[in-house]
Image (tube, rainbow, N blue to C red):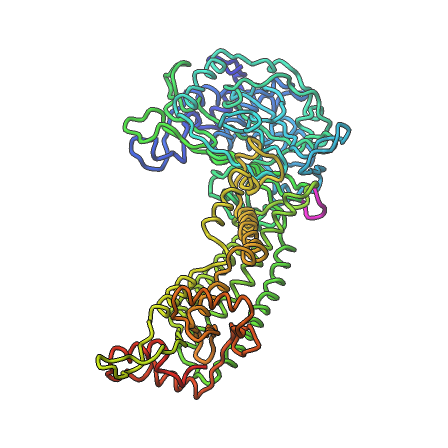
Amino acid sequence: WGQSETCVLSEARDEVETEVDLERAGRRRFLNLIPETSASGTDGAETVDSATAAQLFLPSAAGCKEAVVTASPLPGVGARDPCQALANLCVLEDYDESAPACAYYRKLRDDDASGVVHGESQWKERLPWLYYDDADSALRDASLRATVAVQPPAGAGGGRDRSRLRLRLNSYSLNGTWLGVREVTTQLQLCGGPEAEVAAYLQVGTQYERSCSLHIVRELASLARDLGADIDDGDSGSAGDEDAGTASESPLRRPDATLGPETSGALPWPELRGGFHELYLLDDEGDLFPVPVRVLNFPGGVNRNEATEPWGSVPISTATATLDDRLTRRFYLVDALTGRPRGSGASDGPDVVRYARRLTLRLTMRDAGASRLLPPVLDVEYASAAVGAQGAEATSVPATFATRYAMDLERFWTAVTVLSVLGSVAVLARFALDATAWTRRNQRLPADGGFMFRSVANLLNAYGDVFGVGCVAVSAYWFIFFKGQAEAFVMLPSEAELAPIFIMFGLAAFCKLVRAVALVAAQVRADVFLIDWEGSHGQLVGKGGDLGPDAPVSVWRTIFAANELAELQTARRTYLPLTLFVVLLLLGPVGLEEATRAAPSGTGRETMHAASHWALRLAVGAFSWAIAAGAQVLVRRFFWGPYIEDPLAQFTDLLSVLNVSVLVLDEPFAGHYIHGRSVHAHADASMRELHQQLADEAGGLTGHRGLSPASDAQTFRVFLSTRMRDLYDQKFLNAAPPPMAARERIGLLTGRGAQATSP
């Protein structure tokens, strides 16, 4: 049946003609038209008087009516082809119950006096199963006995491999011919490629996503020529004459039945893309469990919610928005036949094609126990594309296939909430300690704008430290337990689900940025005072031999010290270019970047299409940065500093040679002091004298360099009294220097004119 001329009972035909508008049944309205493929460039719909729909509807409706109402006993597989074809025409209408095919299917279902199958009121023995009664019960069905793992069993005798999904595909052609049941590998994807790469989504726990562009004419519309002969010539295919028994005997109609022999051989590519499919999951006992299909184009938009977004913001098991979803059973990949207008032949192409633009297989872990799955669901989003439209901007259209895993995160968020409260307490405690210490050092200052800015900066710095480390710890938790598990205990949440952690980390990074700005502001506003201890070598002798004023002391030693101090302002414990090089080396050639993919195991082609997850990127990035920076800190602390170069120690030694001390006041009443007063009489000496001084010091012939004669301590934390600060402000900040000779001004700037302020 299903040829250009099909024999049906006249009584059934007449009843169909009186009950259905055949002109409307033969008209296909293609919704969700991709704007770039149409001449007008607008999103909308296009209507086609379909030759295929007009040819199939009347014989399928009449034949199905005969099978449902008059046939006795239950019809075999071949006799059920008309009902399968009628169901396929309904699937093409996105299950719109107002469409003639869907409306007549529902009428026949209501008229079917045969019993229901497995308690599903929508599943009658004489009709294919299209609709679910209740989405909530279907998505939380506890009868599924499927346990999974993320690691394959060890050794040859390790048992069944639970690390890969066992899916089966039951397929029909458009005219209802049964095409058999086959193991699912690459059949769900329109994007081609190596089988190991395309079938990597079957690895349990892999958040897989693969996209490509499909040429409208060569890869989609050309199916009409490959499949058109089957419709016109009535080719029933290799499996069309097989009788699978009654509905109660067929394993495809019994989710709890033992799987019978699968159809051998691969389904030809045109039949696969142009066929209509039902997806099953093979459970632990070898029984088929039907996988619900959620068509996102379902009329009314009831299937679009936060759980059906590309990444999904919540698990399906906890999404209240899924309670009113309309779940179905059957889907297709490409419809290239019903877009052919009336009057076209088998070799003519369609005006419009409709295809599955995005398929997402969603799997959720059961709350009651580890490694157990709730019923999966396949989200399908269809789109239409005009074929060969004049002036169209695009000749190709996108297609995507993805898998998404989810789990109930209630306990995780409870733990995060508790840790956030403890972290907030830690932030406030650290802020209180810092504020108390700063106030004790600067207790004479009023609570002005500068005080408030420093307080806010310290509070933000404490938040950045505590919550930044906390976010890294959370990402490390997901990385360790997701990548290190053998049983499927933890499934990586979607990025949308972990958005609060991402926002928290962004705030922590912003707080550290504010802290860096505050440090730079404090650094540029710090008072730096250079004290030159060098005395004059004697008095100047005039032309007549008379003694004049003291000989001036060169300022170049002080300028040299100031220059070295300026260079130290940018000194760090790590070398940023080296750090970046090591991080890039670890991520690239070493291959740590592969660990950021949302796949529990596998490398290369097996994970190249697994989505990169930001939580894993944060964990790997923090680990790489810690390795690069930590190694430098250890090398500098235990090798480079003691044996090669220590900039701070060398600067202190240089000050002792220059006979210059440095006082840095980074706070109003507190700062740092480096005592650089030389143990020799003069530092402004010749090369011979300088060499002799260093030799005497090395031989222990001089005193110690420290502030006291018996000490070597040269660096100190300084706290100023009110009198000292007032004197400092009076001398160098508030009072303008009076006119003086250039020599005296130089003496003031170098400290020789401020004897009273020297420590």
Q: Residue furthest bottom?
A: 723
- Where residue 704 sits, quadrant-wise, is bottom right
**Residue situated in front as seen by the camera: 584 or 196:** 584
- Where residue 397 sits, quadrant-wise, is top left
**Residue situated in front as seen by the camera: 383 or 440:** 440
705 shown above or below 369: below
- Classified by dominant secondary structure, the portion drawn in magenta counts as loop
x and y percentages locating residue 97 in the rendered image = 50, 36
Q: Judge from the rendering whether residue 637 lies leftward or rightward of residue 247; answer left or right.
A: left
**Residue situated in front as seen by the camera: 250 or 522:** 522
Magenta-highlighted residues = 366-372
x and y percentages locating residue 416 in the rendered image = 61, 59
13 shown above or below 739: above
The answer to whether residue 269 is magenta is no
The answer to whether residue 370 is magenta is yes
x and y percentages locating residue 369 in the rendered image = 72, 46
* Residue drawn at 51 percent across, 34 percent down: 401
Q: Is residue 250 visible?
A: yes
* Residue drawn at 53 percent across, 48 percent down: 621
372 shown above or below 88: below
x and y percentages locating residue 643 in the rendered image = 55, 56
- Count the labels in the image: 0
464 shown above or below 534: above
Q: Residue furthest front?
A: 545
Q: Is residue 313 visible?
A: no
**Residue situated in front as seen by the camera: 516 or 111:** 516
- Where residue 536 sits, quadrant-wise, is bottom left
Q: Residue furthest left?
A: 543
